[in-house]
Image (cartoon, coloured by chain):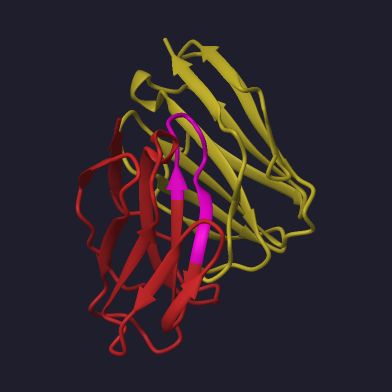
């Protein structure tokens, strides 16, 4: 247990569906992150939020829409995804933003787009 | 953020000491060096962090030479459960500091 939870753990969706991934951290951290990890590839940073404000969007397609209502919760809204979006989606949090701050990762959501 | 270079893969027998070196020639004065471990289908987990010289914890040691242009993660007496991908990150503590996980080093421990 890292103090970061993600739901659902597994998700199968069609290309026309709309779904949301949820992340919650119980660590009192100020920064939260979404990563994508495709099979046998490095982690790709998608979005960063610091004190609820988005500080980084790593050229992510608009079919991925993040939302951070407070410092403890982070959502990733999905719509009209493509099969190549199938991947492990990881959420992380840290006390502050920047590599010096230890990131705590959730277990991930395994997404399959049919 | 300083770019890092690591070996793509390494093999080791159980019980041996494993050293994984990361090159970061453009490391900035305020940058720290952080290592993470990732098992398949799990998120990465922090292992160790250092700024200079040597840092040791219950899991690993981190050796950083005086010029800080490289660092070596040392895993003593590895076991099969140490088979994982190990990532080296270099960066500071600012909102402008991008967090970039490179390909990492895939370590396979052989019985």
The residue stretch that appears in magenta? B37-48
Residue A88, image x, y percentages: 47, 30
Q: Is residue A33 shown in magenta? A: no
Residue B59, image x, y percentages: 51, 56
Regarding residue A17, the answer to whether it shows in the image is no
Of residues B59 and A91, the one nearer the viewer is B59
Residue at left offset 31%, top offset 89%: B66
**Is residue A7 shown left or right of residue B68?**
right
In the figure, A97 relative to B7: above or below?
below
Of residues A23 and A107, the one nearer the viewer is A107
Regarding residue B60, the answer to whether it shows in the image is yes
> How many numbered marks are there?
0
Residue A93, image x, y percentages: 64, 53
Rendered yellow, the chain in question is A
Rendered red, the chain in question is B
Rendering quarter of residue B6 = bottom left
Q: Residue furthest front?
A: B15
Of residues A111 and A2, the one nearer the viewer is A2
Residue at left offset 36%, top offset 85%: B28
**Is residue B26 shown left or right of residue B92?**
left
**Is residue A46 shown left or right of residue A30?**
left
Residue at left offset 50%, top offset 63%: B48
In the figure, A91 relative to B51: above or below?
above
Q: Quadrant of the N terminus of chain A?
A: top right
Residue B50, image x, y percentages: 47, 75
Residue at left offset 32%, top offset 73%: B2
In the figure, A76 relative to B63: above or below?
above
Q: Quadrant of the C terminus of chain A?
A: top left
């Amino acid at each position: 247990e890292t103090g970061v939870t993600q739901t659902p753990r597994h998700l199968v969706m069609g290309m026309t569906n709309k779904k949301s991934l949820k992340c919650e951290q119980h660590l009192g951290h100020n920064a939260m992150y979404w990563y994508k990890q495709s099979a046998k590839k490095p982690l790709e940073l998608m979005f960063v939020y610091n004190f609820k404000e988005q500080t980084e969007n790593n050229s992510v397609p608009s079919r991925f829409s993040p939302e951070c209502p407070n410092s403890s919760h982070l959502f990733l809204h999905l719509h009209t995804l493509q099969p190549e979006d199938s991947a492990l989606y990881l959420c992380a949090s840290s006390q502050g933003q920047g590599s010096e701050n230890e990131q705590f990762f959730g277990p991930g959501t395994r997404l399959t787009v049919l | 953020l300083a770019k890092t270079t690591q070996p793509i893969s390494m093999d080791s027998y159980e019980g041996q000491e494993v050293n994984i070196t990361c090159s970061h020639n453009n490391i900035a004065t305020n940058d720290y060096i952080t290592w993470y471990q990732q098992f398949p289908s799990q998120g990465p987990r922090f292992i160790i962090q250092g700024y200079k010289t040597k840092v040791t914890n219950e899991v690993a040691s981190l050796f950083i030479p005086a010029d800080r242009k490289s660092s070596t993660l040392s895993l003593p007496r590895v076991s099969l459960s140490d088979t994982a991908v190990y990532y080296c990150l270099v960066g500071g503590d600012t909102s402008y500091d991008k967090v970039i996980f490179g390909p990492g080093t895939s370590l396979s421990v052989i019985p």
